[in-house]
Structure formats: structure tokens, C-alpha cells
Image (cartoon, rainbow, N blue to C red):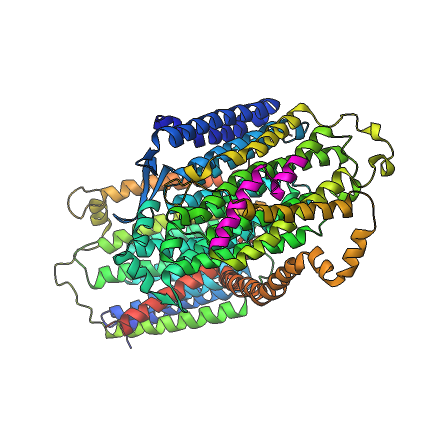
Amino acid sequence: MSASQIIFYIIAAIIIGGGILAVTSRKIFRAAVFLLFSLLGIAALYFYLNYEFIAAVQIVVYVGGIVVLIIFSIFLTHASGDEMKKPVLWRSVFAGLAAVFATALTFLYITEHNFVANSAASVSPSVRNIGLQMLSTTEHGYILPFEVVSMLLLAALIGCIVIAIKIKTKE
Amino acid sequence: MNEIGLTQILFVSTALFFIGVYGFLTRKNMITMLMSIELLLNSVNINFIAFNKYLYADKLVGLFFTVFIITIAAAEAAVAIAIIIHLYRKLKSIDVDDTDIMKF
Amino acid sequence: MLNQNYIALIPILPILTFLVIGLIGRRYFPNFSGILGTLSLLTSFILSATVAYQYFFEVGKIDGVYQKIIALKYVWLQFTPNISIDMGILLDPISVMMIVIVTFISLMVHIYSLGYMHGESRFATYYAFLSLFTFSMLGLVLSTNIFQIYIFWELVGVSSFLLIGYYYEKPSAVAASKKAFIVTRFADLGFLIGILVLSYFSETLDFQTLIQRLTTDGTYLSSIASVSFLGASGLTWGLLLVFAGGAGKSAMFPFHIWLPDAMEGPTPVSALIHAATMVVAGVYLVARLFPVFTISCPAALEVVAYVGIFSSMFAAIIACTQTDIKRVLAYSTMSQIGFMMFALGVSGYHGEEGVGFMASMFHLFTHSIFKALLFLGAGAVIHYVHSNEMKDMGGLRKLMPITHITFLLACLAIAGIPPFAGFFSKEEILTACWNSNKIIFGAAVITAGLTAFYMFRLYFNIFWNKDYSSHHHDTTEHHHGEAPKTMLLPLLILAVLSVVAGFVPFSKLVTADGIGFGTEFHLGFAAGPVILAVCAIALAYYMYAKESLVPQKVSDAFKGFYTAAYHKFYFDEIYLFFTKKIIFNLIGRPAAWVDKNIFDGLMNLLATLTEKLSELIKPFQSGKVQEYAIYFFAGTLGFVLLFIYLWT
């Protein structure tokens, strides 16, 4: 058992443990914090796999943006301190059984499958390479999805404002 | 690092995926359902990165997928929060069982 | 010869009048509708009279035989190259005679109704129905094709239904119209089956072809005569079934029950339909198929004769006991039609043997005149007294002089007193019976005597018997006098005709085979029935001319028989028992139960099942997102398992 394996297993434990606690916790604020830990664990996993850029993006966007947004919404809906209700029994039993069963099934297939690696020269995921590829128009260029995503973000922005706006009625 | 193969990382991502499914099907609070959706999306991200690293090291396809998924997840979470706030103003609760108006 | 367009106008004018009055006249010119109907019928009558004159005296006779002329023929529905339903106009001696009778009596009734139905709320509707009836009857007698006669047969039934039920607020009138229609419709079932039998074997529906094929020896006649069912040949069955239809329309026993009840209609309707025209349709039908009856199937002809004589006597006995004057006249009609039927029944075909046929048609002609007169006179009496019962009448001879004289002339005619019309026709009938069947002759003589008796019983009870003012407080309440002129004019015309109509040389014009023959007058033979009639009249005078206790004593002497005859021998009750208790309970109610519980129940069961099924499925659409997600997830899992493990 080398050190990298141990580190991997710790990271995996953080991810899965945080996930389980996030979905089963009775207090909503704690669930948000456990989600945060789980996301941090995922970022650590990316670091472990030498994909630093993605890890940084993960922390900045997910942890710093989305979880903060979720916490804001918890405040806005005045739900922060209360206990949440336990779910309906048949639903949780069924969902649990189904999830466990599906996990086992997928594990079975993963272990049976023979993953064949593509034996070609590897490209290092450095920021320079990422930047070049993202804005290139040649093959393996991602300029088009980049622009489309920027339009989608604009649409989401306007949509959120429109949905959440409170129209003041003239008193 | 060579000892950790693709299979182990896939185990992690699969487990996280079905934890997310369980949370989505079980939770009563709309915001916690949203959290479960984030877990689902993240498990998919781990899958993409792992495949990119182990199977397709000459391309950066998986990485770009992940970038775009993160972007879109952020946008989607924002819209979902907006909807939840709007519903909260109408129904005065964020219980998902109170939103069952479109039924028989 | 008249152009065929003019001949076609004879039935077309009444139907056009019906449409005009029915659609437009009722709303816009109700009072003028009566005059319109009368004028159109006057035109039809003039055309019919012209056709008759030309047919009988100018163009109809070729080599001494009156021809059957097809004036119009239009193929309507072609079933096979041989069998088709045509619409056409056939002119031969009996149809020409009938169109004259129908249009004339209808014209008299139209004029009479201008006065009788004056002030009725549905005056225009009445005239529309009268025109419809005239059209149907004209179409019936001018038919070239046995199916065409069936169509018009049913139309006549419908018109009768409409007219009997004219006063539809009265439940008794509604019941009577239903009864008439149902009884005749039931008889028409036999008629239809008879048509099918006859036309199947002779492979044609056209009258002339059918008669020719069934009277000459050949393949058609042998094929129908060789088929046998329950002991009688196919030809006998066909003819008897057709006769059943005729018996229904002509109120022969056992289909007679509708005719007395049909008196619920207005009196002019009774005069037109139930005395002179519609009820003779059965006689006309037998006359139309007469060659087949006499030449090929004497057995059926015997049945016709015996049904006729039995109905005649039956009705005469009942008529002696009835107190409603219209009922007496109704039974009298049934009896006289029985005369016509058995006269046909005892007749031969060729030459002088066909005297029965000629006598029957002659009696049809004269009977229509004096029976219409009797009914119209009775209508005038009812109009004056406002009641139908004999006990409310009496001593009217001074208060209604014209009606009195015309009624007396009609009674003399029907009793067979010379020189009035009925004497000649009855004498010919009795001659025909003497020559073929002595039993029927005896019964006919007895019935003729009964006829004279009950007719004069009626006459004396209305116009003599009591003094009118003795049981009516105030004769001045009848400020409208006897009757308006429109009601008196037809009475006068018909009275004149019933005196002179007997002198028409009928045997030269209308015979079974178209060849005229002369008739001789045997004084001794004719005197017998006349003396019997005079004795009957004297008996009636003795019993009824003044108030006396003799009728009561006579009816007490025959107590049981009298009561049975008064209640029409309980036939109505028997039929009602049979239909209500037996048919309704044994067949009607179970059928209704099956329909309601089993068929409807099955449908309801299907509907309930669908509803319950949908109740089961409804909760799946609960509106809860998580439940939808569960179904989605479970479905995906199921498909994955299915495709991985079970798909081969």
C-alpha cells in the first residue's frame, strides 16, 4: 500500500462520506456544508490526477459560486434552523434498494469490462494547451461550444432575473 | 499513482452517482434536491476526467466536457434557485410535495 | 283518348293540393284551403268523368272486349331483369269506375265539410288530409303493379290513421286510430307475404303479366301449384294471404274490430273512408286478381265467399242491437261489403257465369252512393242534436225535412226496394248466388231481410218514435236551423243519384272478362226478396215508429243472445285478452327484461369497468416530481435488465 493509494482512499472517503451525509442530514445547513466538503474532495481528486486547471475551476465555480448561492437561498426561504421532515418510508426504502442494486450492477460491469487505452502520444493538460484548444477553429477546437455556452449563460442570467423579480404593485 | 487504476475511480464516481439518485428521490426539501442534482453532475465530471486521463490521453475532450458541464450546472443551479424563490413566495413553503398542482 | 298527361293529373292534383295546403295553406290561408281543396277535387272529378266517358263509350272497346290500357308506366326499382317495381296507370273497366266513384264521393265530402267543419281550429289540416287520402286511393285503383298497390295500400292506411285521430285530444279517438292502423297493418303482413309468394313463382310484379302467367297452363302455374305447404298448394297460400290483406282493409271477419271504433273520426271522414272508398279496397284487390282466383284456384274463391257471407250475417245481427247511429251504419257497411265479397266468391269468369263479379262491382257502385248519403245525413242529425245516441233523437222529421227525405231515400235504396239503386245490385247478387251455391243464397236472403229491418229501425228511431220537444227543453236553442246549404247540397245530389243509379246498364260495361252481356229481369225471382224487405220494414214500423214496450220485450225474450250481440259477441275482449295477457306477458315483458338488463347491463358493465380501471390508473399522475423520478428510474433499470439479460 503506497502513499498515493492511501491518499486516494482518503480522498474517496471524503467524497463519498460527504455525499452520504449531504443527502441524509436532517438539518439543511449541515447538508449544505457536507455538500461543500464533498465538492472539495472532488477538487482534491482532480489535483491528485494532475488536472490542476479543472480543480481550480471546480473550487471557484462550484464551491465558491454554487454552494454560496445555495446557502443564500436557504437564508432567503427562512429554512435554516428547522428540522426537516423524514421522508416517506416506502419511498426511501425503495430508492435505497434501487440505488444499492444499481450500484452493484454497475460495479459488476465495470470489473468485467476490459478498458483499452489509446496508445498515442499524450497531451499534457496545461493551461496553455487548454487555452489554445478552446479558442481554435481547427479540428479539436472548441470555439463553437464556447460561444454557445456564453449565450446560454446570458439567457440563464436574464431568466433568473425575470423569474425571481418582485414586481412592485402601485400602492 | 500507477496502482490506482481506472476501475477504482469509476467505483467512486458510480457510488457518488447513486448517492445522488437516492438523495433526489428521497429528499422533501427543494433545495436539498438541488444539492443532490449537483452531486449527480459532479459524478459525471469525475467520469469524464478519468476516461480522459486513462483512455484518451492524446486528446482533451473529457476536460472540455467537464468545463462545459460545470458552466451549465452553474447556470442551471441559478435558474433553479430563482424558481424555488418564486415558488416560496407563492406557496410559503419549499416542500416539494406542495407543488403537486398539475395532477389528475 | 285523353292525353296521358291529363290522365296523370287525376291523382297528381290531390297530392299537390295536400302539399300546398299542408305547407303553406295552414299558416297563410286556412279558410281558403277548404275552397282550394274542393276546387282541385272538382277538376279531378271532371277529368275522371271525361276519361270514363271516353273509355266506356269511345275508345275502350275493341271487338266487343274492354281493353286494359296502360296509360303510363315508369320503371322505378329494377331488382332483376324480370322483376321490377313500376309506377303506372292502368285503365280498365273497374279502375275507371273506381276513379269516378272516388273523386265524386270525395268531392261531395269536400263540399259537405265546408259546412260541417266550419270553425274548426285545424280546418286546413283536415282538408290536407282529405287530399292525401284521395291521392292514395286514386293511386291504389290505378296501380299497374302489385307492389305499387301495396305502397298505396299503406298510404291509404296512414291517411285513415290521420283522419280517424283528427280529434287527437280525445283519448278514444287516439285509441281508435291506433287500433285501425295496427289491425290493418297486421293484415298487411299477410298481404306482403302473399305478394312475395305470388311474385316469386311467377317472376313478375306486374299485374297483367302475373295474371296471364298464373291463369294459363305453363311452367309458372305448374311450379306454383306443385309447391305444397301444410296441405294447400303454393297458389292457394299466396291468394289467401293476399285476401287476408284485403280482409283487413275491408273489415271482414276476423279483422273487423277496427271499423266500429273508427267512427270516432269526423262524420264526413266516415262517409268518405269507411263507407264508400277505403273499405272497398279489399274487394277491389280481389277483383283485380279475379282471373287467378276463378280460373286457377277455386278453393281460395270458396274461402272468399264464406268469409264474405259470415261477415255479412255477423254484422247484420250486431247492427240490430246497437244504439249509436254511426255504429249501426258501420256494421251496415261491414255487412254490405260482405255482400260484395261473397258475390265475387260465387262468380265464374266467362260471359254470363261472371254475373257475380258484375253484381259485386255494381253493388260497390250503388253502395258508395247511398252509404255516403246515409253517413252525411247522420252527420247532419248529429250536428243538430249534438249527440250520437238514438235515445237523444226522435221526431226529427218535422225539424229537419231535407235530411229526413234524403235519409229515407237512402234507407229504401239499401233495403232493396225497387226502383231505387240497391234493388238492382242486390238482385244481381242474389241471381249469382242462386246459380252457384244455394246455402249462400239462403243466408244472403236472410241477411237482406235483416238489412231492411235494422236500417228502418235506425230511420224510425231518429225521425219518428218520440216527440223531439218532449225531452229537449227548448227547440229554439238550435238557432242555426237544420244545416247550412253546403251540407244540404251533397245530400240532395246523392239522393237523386241513389234513385237513378240503378238504371245504369252495368252488365254491358263492367264484367270479369271485358265482354258485356245483357241481363234479364225475372219478376218472380225478384219479387221474393222485395216482399221480405217490405215485411221487415213493417216490423220495424210496428216496433219503433211510436214509443212502445215491444222492443224491450223482444230483447228480454232473447236475453243472452241479445246481450252477446250488443257487446259485439265479445270479440274485442277476446282479442284484447289475447294480446295483453298472453302476448305482452309471455313475449313482450321477457323481451323488455332481456333488453334492459342484459343488453343495457352489458353496456353499463363496460362503462363501469372502464371507469374503475381509470380510477386505478389515475393516482399515477400525482403531480409529485419525485414519484415521477422513481418511475423513471425504475423503468430505466427494468429496461437495462431486460435488454442485458433477457434479450436474445
* Res A149 → quadrant: top left
**Which image quadrant: the C terminus of chain C?**
bottom left
- Which residue sits at x=46%, y=45%? C284
Q: Estimate the x, y position of residue C586 in percent, counting from the top left.
A: 58, 67
Q: Which residues are magenta?
A: C408-435
- Identify which residue is drawn at 65% across, 40% down: C411
- Measured as percent of width and height from the top left, residue C308 is found at 53, 54
Splitting the image into 4 quarters, where does residue A8 fall?
bottom left
Q: Is residue C548 visible?
A: yes
Q: As drawn, which residue projects farthest toward the front?
A: C524
* Residue B20 shown left or right of residue C578 in the figure: left
The N terminus of chain C - image quarter: top left
Q: Nearer the viewer, residue C51 or C638?
A: C51
Q: Is residue C162 left or right of residue A147?
A: right
Q: Is residue C98 above or below residue A114?
A: above
Q: Residue at x 47, y 66 (%)?
A: A21
- Most foreground residue, C455 or C428: C428
The verdict on residue C565 being magenta is no
Q: Quadrant of residue C516?
A: top left
Question: Where residue C4 sits: x, y (%)?
Answer: 35, 28
Q: Position of residue C629 (x, y in %)?
A: 43, 60
The residue at the far bottom in this view is A1
Do we see residue C188 in this rendering?
no
Q: Nearer the viewer, residue C169 or C158?
A: C158
Residue in the image at 43% along x and 44% along y: C151
Of the pair C305 and A35, the residue shown nearer to us? C305
User: Relative to residue C172, is residue C63 drawn left or right?
Assistant: left
**Count of numbered circles in the view:** 0
Q: Is residue C410 magenta?
A: yes
Q: Main secondary structure of the magenta part?
A: helix
